[in-house]
Structure formats: C-alpha cells, structure tokens
Image (cartoon, rainbow, N blue to C red):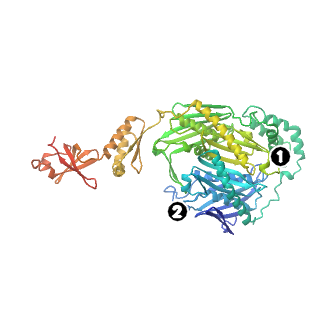
C-alpha cells in the first residue's frame, strides 16, 4: 500500500512496507527526503478511568549522517528536549480522538530514519500516527489531519522548510478533525512568533483545506486491516447503572455541588472531591468499583457543565471574564541577578534570573540542531506546589513542555547578543499551583528580566482560557458554549479546552491549545483569543504598576562584560600556541574570555578592574602598527642580519643591519637583549612583516 497527499507544491508519501509486522499498525511517511517509521501497538486492559497512551519520538543521529555522543558512548542517550516536545505535540493532538471508556494500553513509536535538513519530521510523524491508529483498528471518534503554516511577510507557506521558518513572523502547527456537518474543527495548536491575534486566526483558517484533504486521503486509502476489537471491555453506557444513579442522586449529588461550588478558591476542593469519589466507589462491590469511578466522573462533569451553561455559575463565583486576584512583586531575593513573583489566586510562581558569560551558552548537539542557545527558561514543579508527597526526580515531560512554552513566549522580546551579550537563564519555581502555571511563569519571568536590567522590548504576559460546551448530538458549531477566563483546577479537569495565549500589549507571541472534545469551531477559537487578549491587557497593566521598564543597569551581583572587536587574523595571536597566551591572560586577570570567528571578543569578570587589565592586554597583542609610527621598543633578539625589536606586546619588527650605523657593528658588542631602542616603522609587507629604521643611539 502506497499513496501520496499533495499539499500545495509539496507532497507527503505514505507507504506500508511490512517492516514492523508484529505491531498493530505501521507505516513509513516521507516529506522531501525526511522519512519516519511510525508504529502503533495495543497492549492490555488497565484499571482506571484514564487512557494509558504513550507517544515516543526517537531521533536517530544516523538519520542526519552524524556520529554524536561521548567518546566512550557513541549512541543516542535520553530524548532531547526537541524530541520530548514533538512527542507531546502528537499526544495532545490524538488523545481527544479516543472514546472516554477506552483504557487499553496504546504505544506509538516514531523513529526518524532519514532527515534531509530542510523538512521537519514532526508533521509527517503526526500524520503517520493517525494512519497507524487507523490501521490498528483502535476505536476512534474521528480522523485527524495536521499541517504547519507560516506567515512570511505577506505570504503564507504550508509545511515551510527550516529556512522559511527562520524568516517567518509566526508559525503554527494545527491539527483538526471533521464535524458531523463536514466542517473542520481545530483540536490542537502549537505556535510561536509575534503577530496580532487576527493574523493567527487567518493562518488557522488557511490550514483547514489541507487538513480536510489529509483526512479524506487517509480514510480513502487506509482500511482497518487488523479489525481490532475487545469483547472483554465493557462500556459504561451499556451497563445497568440504575444503582449508581440512585446512590449518587440520594447521597452524593448535593455534597458534590457544595464542595465544587464552595465559593472562593481553596486548596482543599480537589482533595474533597477525590475523597467523595472514593467513598462513592466503596458503596459497591469490588468488581463494580472501576465502573463506579467512571460513572462518578461522568456525572460530575455533566453537573458541572449544567451549572456553568444553565445557571451561569463558576466554582469560585467569578464572572466568566474575571481574573483571580493578582499579586505582583520584584526584587524578591537579596543576591540573585533579578527576580519576579507573580500570583494569580492560588497559582504562584517565583522566577529567578541569572546572567552569565557568553561561554555559558547551552551547547546543542542533536539530530536536527547543532549550535548554541543563549536564552534559557527552566520550569520546576515540586510536589509541595499541589500539597502532595512524592520523590523528587529530574524534570519530566510536563516540566520540559511548560518550560519550553514560556521560553517561546519570551523569545521574541529577548535582545540580541550585540545589544546584550550575556547568556540569560530564568528559572520558574512553581510554589503553588491551581491552574495555568506555564502562563504565570511567563509573567513572573518577564518581571525578573525587567528587574535584572535585561533590555527586553516589552513585558510579556500569558493567560489560560477554558471552554464549557453542552453535551449534544448536534454539530460542534451549533452547540451552546461558554468561554472561561483564567481557569483553575476543576474548570480545567471538567472543562473542554485549555487555550494558553501569551504576548505583549501589541501582539501574540505564543499559543498552545489542548482539547478534550473532538475539536473547536472558528467562533470558539475567536472568542477564546478575544478573552485571552483582554485578560492579558489587564495583567500587563498590573505588572506595569510594579515595574514599567527594565532597570537601567544590571544587578551589582551580575558579572561585568566588555566587548572588543579585533582583526580576525589576530585571533591566533590572542590564543597563542596551544592556548598559552589566552590562558596567561585568564590566569593573571581572573577573567573569562570568549572569542567569535568574526573577531568579537567578550571579556567577563566580577570587577571592572579585571576587565580593564585584560582588555589592555588584548589590545596590545592585537594592535596593528602603521608606517611612520615611532616606538620605544625592547630588543628581543640579536642576529647577524639585524635586531628584532618588540614594538608592543606580542608584536616584533625587524631593524635590518643596513639601517644601523657602521659604528654600531658588530651588533652584539653594542646592543643587549632588553635594551630600549627608539625606532620608526618604515614598511609593512603583504604578509604583515614590519621593517624599522633606527632614529637615534641606544638609550
């Protein structure tokens, strides 16, 4: 089986080669010469009310013709940040397609077999994941298509190559499904750049035709070869739930509503709901408890939606467009280079800025990216932030994903290295969590950057927007819905959408959308963007009251950096044989030195005095003599044909014997190494060799 999908002037080729014959579904997808193998494997039934879906995206160095790793372990290690973000993107898109009662293990493994350096493998991997799910016969609520689109000035590019993406104003990966009326509903977004909201909406609209073509092609060409079914899996809707109904209505519904709509935000609401759910399950025999859990969650979501849609209620009594109480401060810690605290209700984030030398940049070594990264945002989510006890581990996929989203949001306003040569690292500590900590991290990080004197162009803020839509057999576009600004825990858990939007007062800089329903209509998205923009303006106003612009100078605790420009041909002179010269400068002055290929030299130190000393040293080494200049030079060597004179540190010139008076010969009788001579530059040849003339007698 082989078929292709045309997208503008490009095509995606899908082919079933029967490589992974023991998986439930496998396919090879190609865009250009970028090729991925995608497999889906179905495992055993699990206990619980969640979908045990695992998506693994495996980069292979051979795909790019590279051999990486340490000298002793020449193989791939743990997934790169890029691989984790791609796996999360695919997971977020396909998860809403599974029926609520499906609890079998599902693992999708994407292996990048070939990478052409032009085309990203993430969109082919997402389309391939959908194809293998269809091949596996897993029961699904629909078929998905996906495309990346970029705004290039006034032009729009579908599935742009890397070179186009680097020049784009905004780029977004969008995935969607078809509603009952044939309309494309968007169910996942992941975008970054800097444009107005209406431009992003226009881009999303321009993806729908391609998404529709992808869906039609997949459904036309792929048959459920494995015809997967599970006779042992009971569906809650088919069970006799009369006893669940009576027990819940008589003994639990009122208590649930009292807990859920208990007024002001509180940390115990979620704990009490979980305790109530456990109590409900214990009312039934052990073999019925898993279904009791599913029933409780389904009923809780149903009641929650009714209260929002019919009674206009939110769990904490806020209006639909109301933000929780804000608390903003800066300069929170005594010795850090900058800090910001941002609180939105029980969601509280402390972000800390650290400035480092250019040499502190992160070195990137992956299948797609090899280079350096000078702006880093890291996100930590300790268990105490949600009142839990669990072992502390390294950052998981969630932490990496949230940290990267905040980094994308801030990246458009970060100054260039020419303007601000520091390496910039911001760490966001989530000290309390109750909804949208990633967007709170954007706000706190923006404050920390201002506090640390980083000259970012504008402050950036973010907000999370929720959606509550009615349960109905009508098409999504015809259903009643409500947009909720600044969702907290229960509204996220029982709601249908998490739309995260970040930006400045002028433009959007990042967007990420996850859905729990099949997808969103254009009107839902439009209202979500409008609510996000309105909330963002209010948050930025509050931040501006505390600090309106970056401080004029960096923290006194931050290192000092000086920038020099030297002739690139002199770089070798500064470094010296086997690094002897540069190491001597570092040892004698206590600075760190970073040299770029274009001759830019960054000198970093704790004191201005150390920088000045190192700067003068390098200036002397790289100083270039001019014809006619006079120097009081020091004799370095005396040879039969003349004298080598050091006219400035590291620069020797020849005083030929023909330029020395006859009465000063033989030379070794009249001159000594270390003596000073007043000399004049009379010639500099094409190789940079300097000739001197003697002005007067030995001094």
What quarter of the picture does the C terminus occupy? Answer: top left
Note whether residue 341 is visible.
Answer: yes
Q: Residue furthest front?
A: 154
Label 1 packing within 10 angstroms: few (<14), some (14-19), many (20+): many
Label 2 packing within 10 angstroms: few (<14), some (14-19), many (20+): few
Q: Mark 2 — residue? A: 65
Percent of width and height locating residue 574? 35, 47
Q: Secondary structure at mark 2?
A: loop
**Which quadrant holds residue 620?**
top left
Report whether 378 appears left or right of 617: right
Note whether residue 52 is visible.
Answer: no
Percent of width and height locating residue 305? 80, 42
Proximity of marks 2 and 1: CB atoms separated by less than 8 Å: no
The structure residue drawn at horizontal position 18% and vertical position 48%, both measured from the top left corner, is 693
Report whether 322 appears left or right of 685: right
The structure residue drawn at horizontal position 68% and vertical position 52%, both measured from the top left corner, is 205
What quarter of the picture does the N terminus occupy? Answer: bottom right
Q: Mark 1 — residue? A: 295
């Amino acid at each position: 089986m082989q078929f292709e999908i045309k997208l503008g002037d490009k095509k995606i080729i899908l082919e079933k080669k029967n490589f992974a014959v023991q998986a439930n579904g496998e396919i090879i997808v190609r865009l250009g010469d970028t090729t991925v193998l995608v497999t889906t494997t179905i495992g055993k039934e699990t206990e619980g009310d969640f979908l045990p879906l695992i998506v693994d995206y495996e980069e292979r160095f051979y795909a790019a013709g590279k051999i990486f790793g340490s000298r002793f372990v020449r193989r791939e290690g743990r997934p790169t940040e890029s691989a984790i973000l791609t796996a999360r993107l695919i997971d977020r898109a396909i998860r809403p397609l599974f029926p609520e009662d499906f609890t079998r293990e599902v693992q999708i493994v994407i292996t990048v077999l070939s990478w052409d350096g032009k085309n990203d493998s993430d969109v082919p991997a997402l389309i391939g994941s959908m194809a293998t799910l269809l091949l596996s016969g897993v029961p699904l609520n629909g078929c998905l298509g996906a495309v990346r689109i970029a705004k290039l000035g006034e032009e729009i590019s579908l599935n742009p190559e890397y070179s186009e993406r680097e020049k784009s104003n905004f780029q977004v990966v969008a995935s969607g499904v078809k509603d009952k009326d044939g309309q494309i509903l968007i169910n996942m977004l992941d975008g970054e750049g800097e444009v107005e909201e209406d431009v992003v909406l226009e881009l999303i609209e321009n993806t729908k035709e391609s998404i529709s073509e992808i869906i039609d092609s997949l459904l036309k060409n792929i048959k459920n070869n494995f015809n997967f079914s599970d006779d042992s899996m009971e569906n809650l809707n088919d069970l006799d739930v009369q006893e669940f109904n009576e027990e819940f209505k008589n003994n639990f519904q009122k208590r649930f509503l009292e807990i859920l709509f208990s007024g002001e935000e509180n940390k115990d609401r979620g704990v009490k709901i979980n305790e109530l759910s456990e109590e409900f399950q214990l009312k039934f025999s052990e073999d019925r408890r898993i279904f009791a859990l599913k029933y409780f969650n389904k009923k809780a979501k149903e009641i929650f939606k009714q209260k929002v849609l019919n009674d206009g209620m939110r769990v904490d009594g806020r209006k639909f467009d109301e933000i929780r109480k804000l608390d903003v401060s800066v300069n929170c810690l005594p010795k850090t280079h900058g800090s910001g605290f941002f609180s939105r209700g029980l969601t509280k984030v402390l972000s800390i800025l650290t400035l480092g030398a250019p040499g502190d940049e992160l070195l990137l070594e992956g299948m797609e990216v090899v280079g350096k990264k000078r702006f880093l945002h890291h996100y930590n989510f300790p268990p105490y932030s949600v009142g839990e006890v669990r072992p502390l581990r390294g950052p998981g996929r969630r932490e990496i994903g949230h940290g990267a989203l905040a980094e994308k949001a801030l990246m458009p306003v970060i100054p260039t290295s020419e303007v601000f040569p520091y390496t910039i690292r911001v760490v966001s500590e989530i000290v309390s969590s109750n909804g949208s900590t990633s967007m709170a991290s954007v706000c706190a990080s923006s404050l920390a950057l201002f506090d640390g004197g980083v000259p970012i162009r504008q402050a950036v803020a973010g907000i999370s927007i929720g959606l509550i839509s009615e349960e109905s057999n009508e098409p999504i576009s015809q259903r009643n819905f409500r947009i909720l600004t600044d969702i907290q825990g229960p509204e996220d858990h029982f709601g249908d959408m998490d739309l995260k939007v970040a930006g400045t007062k002028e433009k959007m800089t990042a967007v990420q959308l996850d859905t729990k329903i099949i997808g969103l209509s254009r009107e839902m998205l439009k209202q979500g963007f409008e609510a996000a923009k309105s909330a963002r303006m209010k948050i930025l106003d509050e931040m501006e009251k505390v600090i309106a612009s970056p401080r004029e100078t960096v923290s006194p605790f931050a290192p000092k950096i000086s920038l020099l420009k030297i002739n690139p041909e002199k770089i070798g002179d500064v470094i010296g044989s086997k690094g002897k010269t540069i190491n001597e400068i570092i040892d004698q002055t206590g600075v760190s030195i970073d040299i770029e290929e274009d001759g830019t030299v960054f000198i970093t130190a704790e004191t201005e005095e150390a920088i000045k000393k190192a700067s003068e040293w390098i200036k002397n080494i790289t100083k270039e003599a001019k014809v006619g200049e006079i120097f009081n030079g020091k004799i370095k060597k005396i040879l039969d044909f003349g004298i080598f004179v050091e006219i400035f540190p590291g620069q020797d010139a020849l005083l030929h014997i023909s330029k020395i008076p006859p009465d000063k010969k033989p030379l070794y009788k009249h001159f000594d190494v270390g003596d000073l001579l007043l000399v004049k530059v009379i010639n500099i040849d094409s190789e940079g060799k300097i000739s001197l003339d003697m002005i007067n007698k030995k001094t």
